[in-house]
Image (tube, helix red, strand yellow):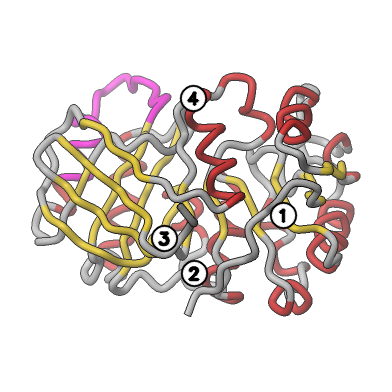
Amino acid sequence: MIKQPPYLKKGDKIALVCPAKKLPKSIGYAVGVLKDWGLEVIIGESVYASYHQFAGTDELRAKDIQQFLDDPSIKAIIAGRGGYGTIRIIDNLDFTAFKQNPKWFVGFSDITVILSHLISQCEVQCIHAQMPYTFEDATPESIVSLKNSLFGKTQEYMYESEFENQAGLVTGSLIGGNLTLLTVVQGSVSEMDFKDQILFLEDVGEHEYSIDRMLRMMKRAGKLTDLKGLIIGAFNEIEVEKIPFGQTANEVIWDIVSEYNYPVCFDFPTGHIDHNLSLVLGATVELKVEITKVQLKYISHGNT
């Protein structure tokens, strides 16, 4: 059973860290937003550290995160940004204390490595959402969705997709994240169990052939066979190749998953976009998919 960390309340202490790439700018705006929520914000050493392209050395980043994993007074840890580097430190983190006193961990993109590990090895819910680096460009709704997830307010998302969906109604546990990172952790202890789950995927800057290759690898490994449902988020910033692949990202994905009978929805507002809505991994959700209309409703996460 996936455990749910305690929801935040005003006065709680949270920590900001950078598990991967260094920040190219101040995140003062985001710190102000978090403080306006009534939270006490602790800035980790990695937030403004620099070592080549990373937020400090591997040792510094791991040590910084470890202190907050172990500190019971810290009620949530939010990654400042993604980039690359989380996989270099994941095996140096000790989650023993974290398992005894679970707390929220927030991030997306490269942080998928930690989120996947928390589901796989700790069986603790975590949050795929906007990070401080993206706060200034984020839609107000996406920022509010993160606040609601952290403070336990029940959420329901509805939108219309431009690409035709495969209809269906299912209830199940929500897992997922960045396609590249989910592929990278396959075969390791950080890999999530996909069986009977509702999976969401997103990615950025990958050519169509790369998306095709990674998803076919997942298919060959049996990861797509026994899903309850599939949510396709943003696959954006795809550079045009000299010789076109001939399909859009959505067309590539549909070709691979069309043989399955579970509901599949496209264009879900999650990923490397301004309107990156918060998704709670490990929470039970109801997914209702029509040809163009989609509704995602939390069943086990949040209080009205």
Disc 1 element: strand
Q: Earlier in the sequence, mark 4 or mark 3?
A: 3
**Amino acid under disc 2:** Glu
Residue 249's quadrant in the figure?
top left
Q: Which numbered disc flags the more N-terminal residue, 2 or 3?
A: 3
Query: Which residue shows up at 45% across the image and 28% down it?
Result: 275
CA–CA distance in space, label 4 to label 2: 28 Å
Instruction: Establish if 261 lies above or below 140.
Output: below
Between label 2 and label 1, give the one nearer the viewer.
1
Query: Which label lies toward us, 4 or 2?
Result: 4
> Which secondary structure lies at badge 3?
strand
- Crowding near the residue tagged with mark 3, few <14, some 14–19, many ≥20 C-alpha atoms within 10 Å: many
Give the residue number, with chain letter if any, for mark 1: 76
- Kindly identify the amino acid type of the residue bearing the numbered disc 4: Asp
Disc 4 element: loop
Upstream in the sequence, badge 1 or badge 3? 1
User: Where's residue 138, x and y in %?
Assistant: 55, 24
Q: Position of residue 262 (x, y in %)?
A: 15, 60
Magenta part of the chain: 236-254
Asked if residue 175 is positioned above or below residue 157 in the image, the reply reads below
Label ID, residue 191: 2
Badge 1 local density, few (<14 within 10 Å), some, or many (20+)? many
- The residue that label 4 is drawn on is 274
Q: CA–CA distance between discs 2 and 3?
A: 11 Å
Q: Residues within 10 Å of mark 2 (few under 14, many from 20)?
A: many
Q: Residue at x 50, y 58 (%)?
A: 184
Query: Of all residues shown, which one is farthest toward the front?
Result: 304
